[in-house]
């Protein structure tokens, strides 16, 4: 948060989260548009913008057939690469090349059966602790209960102190963002969370620009 970063937003997603803030990236039906570019052209645009930190996001970036080629090009320029993913696809070819995987499994408020446990387990088994952060959108008590079940299922989160980020869900939070952050912070006072490396953080772009497209 706060680091000058170039975002590469890919088109298309394999989920339909109820509260998604980039529904325009799903398909043309949701008002989406895209520009078809080669990996070389994308890399050239990234270099032109100048930031040393690059986030590959979506939609869902792991759907992209040319992701390995793009990652190889960007790593050749010594850029710091983050991939934001819903953890439903494990791209083995690029997994070791990414500096930080921002892994965001979707809890019950997003939709039913969006937690793909076999894929999540591949990420847990193949990434170094310093190569991963786990980000969860928490709308309500049902989401928190779902998250607690998830973490209890995988003791590695406590054992290796894997970074966990909790964020309030944007549609619910926007009316009173400070209150939404307070509610989330209060949840973390429960002794359950003492075993985890967990932080509650805002979506800074929502605070600065609101729920605007392209930010």
Image (cartoon, rainbow, N blue to C red):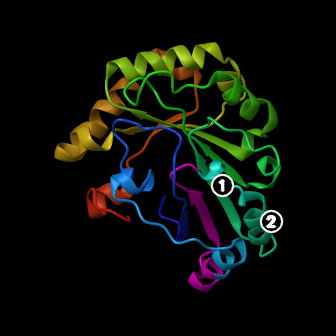
Q: Secondary structure at mark 1?
A: loop
Give percent across and percent down for residue 205: 36, 59
Q: Toward the viewer: 116 or 187?
A: 116
Would residue 131 be seen by someone viewing this image from the given angle?
A: yes
Say which mark, if any, is on residue 64: 1
User: Which of the two discs, 1 and 2, sits closer to the camera?
Assistant: 1
Number of marks present in the image shown? 2
Extreme-left residue of the structure: 175
Q: Determine the residue positioned at 68% across, 73% down.
A: 38
From what the image shows, is residue 127 above or below residue 196?
below
| Region rendered in magenta | 45-60
- Where is residue 19 shown, x and y percent of the image? 33, 39
**For residue 97, above or below residue 143:** below
Residue where numbered disc 2 is placed:
72
Q: Residue at x 54, y 33 (%)?
A: 105
Lateral position of residue 98 relative to residue 206, left or right: right
Query: Within 10 angstroms of label 2, few (less than 14), some, or many (20 or more) residues?
Result: some
């Amino acid at each position: 948060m706060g680091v000058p970063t170039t975002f590469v937003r890919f088109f298309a997603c394999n989920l339909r989260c109820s509260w998604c803030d980039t529904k325009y990236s799903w398909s043309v039906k949701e008002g989406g548009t895209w520009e078809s570019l080669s990996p070389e052209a994308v890399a050239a645009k990234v270099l032109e913008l100048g930031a040393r930190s690059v986030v590959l996001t979506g939609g869902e970036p792991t759907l992209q057939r040319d992701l390995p080629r793009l990652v190889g090009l960007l790593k050749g320029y010594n850029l710091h690469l983050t991939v934001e993913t819903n953890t439903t696809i494990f791209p083995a070819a690029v997994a070791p090349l990414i500096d930080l995987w921002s892994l965001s499994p979707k809890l019950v408020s997003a939709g039913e059966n969006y937690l793909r446990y076999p894929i999540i387990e591949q990420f847990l088994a193949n990434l170094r602790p310093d190569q991963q952060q786990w980000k969860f959108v928490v709308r309500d008590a049902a989401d928190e209960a779902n998250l607690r079940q998830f973490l209890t299922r995988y003791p590695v989160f406590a054992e290796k102190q894997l970074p966990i980020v909790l964020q309030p869900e944007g549609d619910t939070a926007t009316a009173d963002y400070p209150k939404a952050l307070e509610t989330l912070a209060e949840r973390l006072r429960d002794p359950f969370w003492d075993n985890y490396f967990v932080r509650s953080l805002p979506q800074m772009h929502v605070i600065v620009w609101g729920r605007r497209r392209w930010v």
